[in-house]
Image (spheres, rainbow, N blue to C red):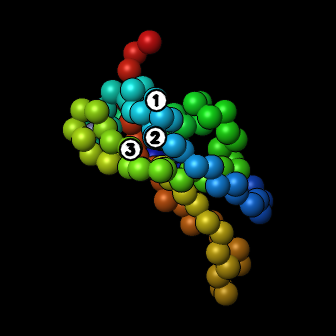
Amino acid sequence: MGRPERVRPSWKNTIPVLIDQNTIRTAEQQIDSCEACEPDKAEIPFDYVLDCITGSDPELTDYILEQPARCPRCSGEVLTGYWRWYDSETEGRKAFVLPGTLVTLKAG
Ligand SMILES: [Zn+2]
C-alpha cells in the first residue's frame, strides 16, 4: 500500500484556510499515531482530519497551520499536504504534489 494518489482533473485555484491553535488541538486529539511511529498502520492523510473538522473542500483548500501540529504519541511534526500547478516546457501543465503526513485516528 503506497500513498494515495491525488488526481487533479483540471486547473483550480486553491483557497488558503488558516488553521488556528484550537483547530490544531482538535485535530491532534483525533490522532492516535502517525507514520513516523506506526508506519504500518498510518493511512489517513492529516489533511483529511482537517477536512472533517473544517468542512472544507479538499480539492480547493490549502491549509495553513498557525503553529505545527504534533503527533500525540511521538511528538513528531504532522504536516498537511499541498500541491501546485507548474508549467513544464516539455510536458505542459503538471501538478506537483507533496502528500501530507499519514496518521491513524483514535477509535470512536
Ligand atoms: Zn507519531
Left or right: residue 43 versus residue 92 is left
The alpha-carbon separation of the residues under discs 1 and 2 comes to 9 Å
**SS at mark 1?**
helix
Question: Dividing the image into 4 quarters, which one contains the N terminus?
Answer: top left
Question: Dividing the image into 4 quarters, which one contains the C terminus?
Answer: top left
Circle 1 Cα neighbour tier, 10 Å, few/some/many (<14 / 14–19 / ≥20): few
- Residue linked to disc 1: 26
- Residue linked to disc 2: 21
Left or right: residue 104 versus residue 75 is right
In the image, farthest residue toward the bottom: 89
Query: Where is residue 92 drawn, in percent x and y?
Result: 71, 78
Q: Nearer the viewer, mark 3 or mark 2?
A: 2
- Residue linked to disc 3: 69
Query: Where is residue 41 drawn, in percent x and y?
Result: 33, 31
Return the disc, 3 or 2, that comes first in the chain's sequence.
Answer: 2
Query: Where is residue 88 drawn, in percent x and y?
Result: 64, 82
Q: Are marks 1 and 2 in contact (CB under 8 Å)?
A: no
